[in-house]
Image: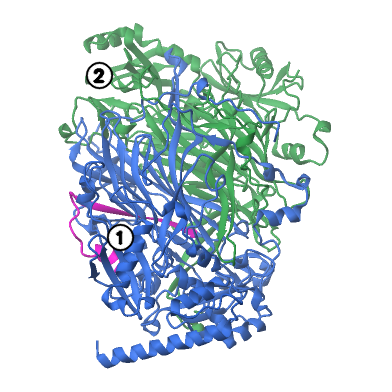
Amino acid sequence: MDRSTSLLRLILLALGAALVLLVVRSAFRLPRGIDTPTTSLFDDEATAGSSCTRFAPWGCRQADRIKQKPPSHENDVPRHPLDPLTISEVNRARELLRAHPPFASSPSSMFVHSLALDEPDKPVVLSWRKGVDPLPPRRAVAVVRFRGEAFVLAIDLASGAVTPLPVPASGYPTMTMDEQVLLCYTPFRDPAFNATIQRHGVRLSDVACLPISLGWYGPSEENRRLIKIQCFSAEGTANFYMRPIEGLTVLVDMDTREVVRISDRGAGIPIPPAANTDYRYSRHMQDEGDDQQTAGFQKVRAPSMEPGPSSGPRVELVDGHTVRWGGWEFHLKADARAGMVVSRARVQDPGTGAHREVLYKGMASELFVPYMDPTEAWYFKTYMDAGEYGFGLQAMPLVPLNDCPRHARYLDGVFVAADGRPYVREKMICVFERYAGEVAWRHSESPITGLDIRESRPKVTLVARMVASVANYDYIMDWEFQMDGLVRIKVGLSGILMVKGTSYSHLSEARGNEGDMHGTLLSENVIGVIHDHYVTFRLDMDVDGADNSFVRVEMARQETGPGDESPRRSYLRATRRVAETEKDARVRLSLYHPAEFHVVNPAKKTRVGNPVGYKVVPAGTAASLLDPEDPPQKRGAFTNNQIWVTPYNKSEEWAGGLFVYQSKGEDTLDTWSERDRPIENKDLVLWYTLGFHHIPCQEDFPIMPTVSSSFDLKPVNFFESNPILKQRPTKEDDLPICTASTAA
Amino acid sequence: ASSHSHPHPLDPLTPDEITAVRAAVLASPRVPARPLTFHYVGLDEPDKPDVLAYAYGGSGSSSRPLLPRRALVIARAGGQSHELRVSVASNGTSAAVLSHAVHSGAGFPVLTLEEQFAAVALPQAYPPFVESVRRRGVDMDDVLCAVFPVGWFGGRAGTTAKRVAKMLCFVAGPTANFYARPIEGITMVVDLDAMAIVGYRDRVTYPVPKAEGTDYRAGKTGPPLAPGVAVQPEGRGFHIDGHVVRWANWEFHVGFDMRAGTVISLASVHDHDADAGTRRRVLYRGFVSEIFVPYMDPVEEWYYRTFLDAGEYGLGLWAFPLQPGADCPANAAYLDGSYAGQDGKPVGGENRICVFERYAGDVAWRHTEAGFPDRLITEVRPDVTLVVRMVVSPGNYDYILDWEFKTSGSIKFVVSLTGLLEVKGTSYTHADEITVDAHGSLVSENTIAVYHDHYVTYHLDLDIDGTNNSFVKNIITAKRNTGDPATGGAGTPRRSYWTVRREVAETEADGQADVNAAPADLLLVNPGKKTRMGNEVGYRLIPSGATAASVLADDDYPQRRASYTKKQVWVTPYSKSEKWASGLFADQSTGADSLTAWSRRNRGIRDQDIVLWYTLGLHHIPYQEDFPVMPTLSGGFELRPSNFFERNPILKIGRPPIRSSASGNCSCDAR
């Protein structure tokens, strides 16, 4: 880089920092006793954040939590090659980064956007034996920004070596929680913003603001990290999302924390009323008075789903991250970006007792949530929740008894704050056995045969769950393991719709202009805007070994010939086609052309000669309708197909690219796949995208009943026969003795 | 005297009523021929307006006069099918024939269990079959046979057609899973009226698959696995009064029919925001109308296997007692399903339906709010549902048919398939030996599991907030943004978005929908009722997997009989006689009396009393894991309120159903 340009940038940055300091100092009167000397830009702002002033209600909770260092994880040590970084490892990595030459000159100017385990190479993990081999060298990979520039660095925790890695050509890394917090303060430092708020008739103390990622819409917004902020009135309700100050959008420079532009096109649009928007139990109890007036469903009490007696299998959580249950064994951990990661999933073959590989690594790789309103205040709302916000960062503690049943076990996550310090996200994942009254298999024999046979087996499964609350939305992410070898991956959508304020208070007022609503009138002055959700999973399948092939089993009508003796005229024929290259394996599902999609190990066959495999059973098949050239669709091009298959590449993990924020789609699953690499009999990665089109309805207001969809990974000729054939039936003695206590 | 404290006009016929009906039919001079066999005896439910007045009329239930009880009987005598309507006295002890007709079109009624019993005994005494068995080295004592409908493949239909079936035989020996050991290559035709074998062909000999690895009965050995259990120490949260079930905000009537099995009627939901005590109607009557299972092997022994399980076998007839703790959890309640035997006498039918509350760890709704200073708000409600279940085992397959009622006002329909595959004997012992289309998968030595489909068609007479409804398609349409407000675009760099084009179906042709076509929300709405916001109240149909449609040629004979399986959704105007998608007389039918034929009239369906028909479809390519008994495979669909309620109906759900103190209420020690 030209030296003079570099110097100019430094000067501008310094001036910006000084300006920010000045503004902070003048905008907030810090309470007496916490006015400490300013040692760094970050520390000062963190201090400001922790004051939790009334002017910026959003996000302060994280600031508080970030400070906590729960002692229960202080002494954790890794026990498995895939175990996430421990607290001491994070601290070690932080020290190494701060001592690294570019950052050593000003460690306080370094912001950590990502710091996570750099997983050992796949062959190393596969060959590692617990109790026999030492852990492979522990390495971390960090994404940091320093004085406006992004760095990707590999850190060897033992030797202390810090090695630069390639940086993507476009895009910025995931926002840190700290800056999401601080950005919400920024508009309040702008007098024009405050005046605008007051013109809308809202008190500043009632305002809650939300940072909304920008997307990418051409060159005018490039070369600086920008974000748009939308604000709501939190007066009278916890559900401020239902009370948008419509049409008001603040464009903020994330680095200088300056307001770049205020757009206010909301004249004449009232703020929707607070009535009927709150969802808190305590609030409704106040409203309802005594229980006598409640409707029938309010008295519903759940049966308690209990695991079987102690003679049965139990969920074993070994060394903190290894889960064993019902023939399954897998490694489970929390990740700041993906949320929950399932690795080395192996299932026991009931015939031989051997644990066979199914999945090396599985996780949600990216989400894409485009809203369908092209107007100024809405067109850019095309979220990529994992890459922009961090899916795992947005996971909040699960609520026992409600998010997860009584007998669930919980795992915490250890994450890294922007200053590189570790913090703990408690109860981020739960694991529980599920019995929902479903049947695993059964057969009753007809009395015509003279055989009085009634054989039935209940279905018990294992669920690993995380919930990510990405501002308004709550994603319930379930991995369900069945004893017949099937894995069901399920996404439940709940939480609060992103709504648009409107002058309409009844649909009759919109007569003739329904198309301009771009959604459904949910309540007075509230439109639920239509949108999509796409969740793309990366599934590094290793069916009975790393080298697999992707097989499409196509079902088509076959006509019988005139020479055939059969009076049938048609039947269904199944034809297997092996995909040779990446483009052969792109699947845009067309249910007019039914097909199955298998990942097989061509080198392994069953006793009667079928290649062993797993199939992906599609569901949640909504596909993108956006124009392929629309900027958000270029960034979310992984939604062009429901199924992609790529050769294994450790660096190809994030479907939206490593740097998603303001990216242009240059480094995505679509561009990798464009290379059309061979995939036959190779180590494969299967990518599956679950899609939802959402046209809101009034029942989704003010908080949505959960909508779920899922897809399955199902063994196909993986086992010799039904693997749960020998499951024994329930006996009366299996039932516990339960009586209600008079104390209730 | 009535066996129920509160009899209901939709209650299934009681054993006493069945007895009275039988006596009336036998005494009737209109059917003098003998022997006379009863093929269907079911409630001929009162006319819809009368039922609605009974159920939703203003006065209290105790003062409502009972509606007249009537039965529909289908009986065969003298080679004819007779339809009789019989009135039953209110005390259920006497009956009289009201009307009589002789069926003159194609098709025959449901096969009775008794005639199937009689037919399967014939081969053992039939010399050519005995010789074929001997030639295959099989012990006749190990042989079991089953009756298979022949379908229709052109040729005579109607009164001149013989009522015939084919019989296939298997070897049991040391295994209970005889379906896995077919005696391949033999076709026998039995005349069901004459009860004699009238056709025989032994075309080819294949090895009989071995018995090893086919049995599925619990032995003394095997890995221990104790299942989870559902515990309700404070008792069930639902109430059953006769056949009326009340739970949470739901109330509905559960009936039983020998052809359909479970019948759900008068489903209504309590709306907290509506007038106090108001129940809003959702579904007048719903049941499985037909199950079509075509196999995909065109050869002589297989081509005709294109079952219509409800119309040919009867789903209620082939429901068997449910196993507590295995078919249904420990907290379930059970309902019986009586039906009439071939001789017209009542058969008990214990424990045919179970009802239970389900909590599977799912979340009804939730939100975590991190946006407030000093506090994290998390509100979560567990998802508790009520399941009504029946299991049908028509031969090798087992269908677990669930109706799941949710507190959100949704009804979820789930079909789970398990049981035994229909397999074909073969000389192949390894997949490498297969060089031509085997029409199936090699699942064990000498055993091919044949490709097939399942189509389960529901008849759902929805009455959303009233009788007159419309069918609406909210078609999702991609739209391009010109970027120029002058041309109707938005002045932004966004180039595309999708919007909704609303189409109201005017006639039956408009009401057909293929859910695999362009994306759309499909709704049934009441155009006369709006929410406070002005949205039409409605329910949305949400397919959930299992959306396969038939790929058979339109002129293939089985497809003509079940041509409604080319699309998942059909909407017809309500007609009391249009119940069975495959026609009233489905066995050997031609499709002339079927959902497709009725719908061809293209009647108006806008703002009418309409019926939704939904077909759930599965293509099944078998795998070794499906042998010898299939792990359950599920699919379903949901009816979800869409602008039916003013807002989330479970927002004000009571205190979280499971409290921390629950552990203090219940001791869950194992015995």
Quadrant of the snapshot with the N terminus of chain B: top right
Q: Foreground: B340 or A11?
A: A11
Q: Position of residue B62 (x, y in %)?
A: 82, 31
Q: Tell whether position A680 is magenta.
A: yes
Give the residue displayed 40% in from the left and 10% down from the top: B121
Q: Where is residue B41 in the image (x, y as percent from the top left)?
A: 60, 22
Which chain's colour is green? B
In the image, residue B216 above or below residue A616: above
Q: Position of residue B170 (x, y in %)?
A: 32, 17
Tell me the subunit letter for badge 1: A
The image quadrant that residue A393 belongs to is bottom left
* Magenta region, residue range: A667-693
Give the residue displayed 75% in from the left and 46% down from the top: A291
Give the residue displayed 26% in from the left and 76% down from the top: A101
The image quadrant that residue A346 belongs to is top left
The image quadrant that residue A119 belongs to is bottom left
In the image, residue A244 above or below residue A386: below
Q: Foreground: B329 or A43?
A: A43
Which residue matches tag 1?
A653
Which residue matches tag 2?
B208
Is A575 left, or right, of A536 in this rendering? left
**In the image, what residue type sits under mark 2?**
Val
Residues packed near mark 2 inside 10 Å, few (<14), some (14 to 19) or many (20 plus)? many
Is B19 left, or right, of A560 in this rendering? right
**In the image, what residue type sits under mark 1?**
Glu
Residue A378 visible to the viewer: no
Tell me the subunit letter for badge 2: B
In the image, residue B459 above or below residue A626: above
Q: What element carries label 2?
A: loop
**Residues at marks 2 and 1 on the same chain:** no
